[in-house]
Image: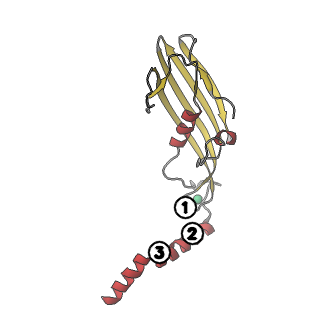
Amino acid sequence: MPNYNIRISGIKDGNHEYFFNINEKFFESFVGSEVTNCVIKVNCNLFKDGNKLKLFLHVEGNILNFNCDLCAGSINLSIVNSIDVLLQETESEMEDTDEIIYIQSNQSHIDISQLIYETIILSIPSKIEHSGVENDICDKEMMVLLDKYAEKKEINDPRWGDLNKLKDLI
Ligand SMILES: [Zn+2]
């Protein structure tokens, strides 16, 4: 995996911009990731003002080979997301939060790969469905099969059996 280290010590005040291209290689080190392939551009902006360090991250692109909730077919998700965090020096062991990442006073670089990963994962919408526009359509045959399977499952569900018995009694 390429390196996603950003220098944070000995830099001038002002903006420091970095660009990264994220593809499938990136996810190899994130075992069990629901995203495995993508074409995403990352724009990272480190802003230094005296002792203050602020990191701004913008991700934009496409997650590839995701599965549609409706037809289970392959889908390309276009995503966009931004976050900003404060880099705060600390001498003690502190747990990072959504707003603050703690750094050591002698730390020269920060690895932002985990932050990039989280920003991509958080950009995934809760509903993933083919849009129905042009070629981005659901596999109708597959939907019928899935429906049949779901019905079968419902009938085999023991709770339904009990309910049916109850119905027979009434
Ligand atoms: Zn679909």
* Amino acid on which disc 2 is placed: Leu
Quadrant of residue 24 within the rendered picture: top right
* SS for callout 3: helix
The numbered mark at residue 70 is 1
Q: Where residue 14 sits in the image (x, y, percent)?
A: 53, 13
Quadrant that contains the N terminus:
top right
* Amino acid on which disc 1 is placed: Leu
Query: Which of these two is toward me, 69 or 166?
Result: 166
Q: Name the residue carrying label 3.
A: 154
Quadrant that contains the C terminus:
bottom left
Q: Name the residue carrying label 2.
A: 146
The image quadrant where one finds ligand 1 is bottom right
Residue extending furthest toward the bottom:
169
| Mark 2 residue crowding within 10 angstroms, few (<14) / some (14–19) / many (20+) | some
Direction from residue 60 to residue 25 in the image, left or right:
right
Answer whether labels 3 and 1 touch (C-beta < 8 Å).
Answer: no
For marks 3 and 1 on the same chain, the one whose residue lies earlier in the sequence = 1
* SS for callout 1: loop
Foreground label between 3 and 2: 3
* Amino acid on which disc 3 is placed: Glu
- C-alpha span from label 2 to label 1: 9 Å
Does label 2 point to a residue whose CB lies under 8 Å from ligand 1? no
- C-alpha span from label 3 to label 2: 12 Å
Does label 1 point to a residue whose CB lies under 8 Å from ligand 1? yes
| Mark 1 residue crowding within 10 angstroms, few (<14) / some (14–19) / many (20+) | some
Direction from residue 157 to residue 57 in the image, left or right:
right
Q: Where residue 129 sits in the image (x, y, percent)?
A: 55, 55
- C-alpha span from label 3 to label 1: 18 Å
Q: Where residue 39 sits in the image (x, y, percent)?
A: 66, 40
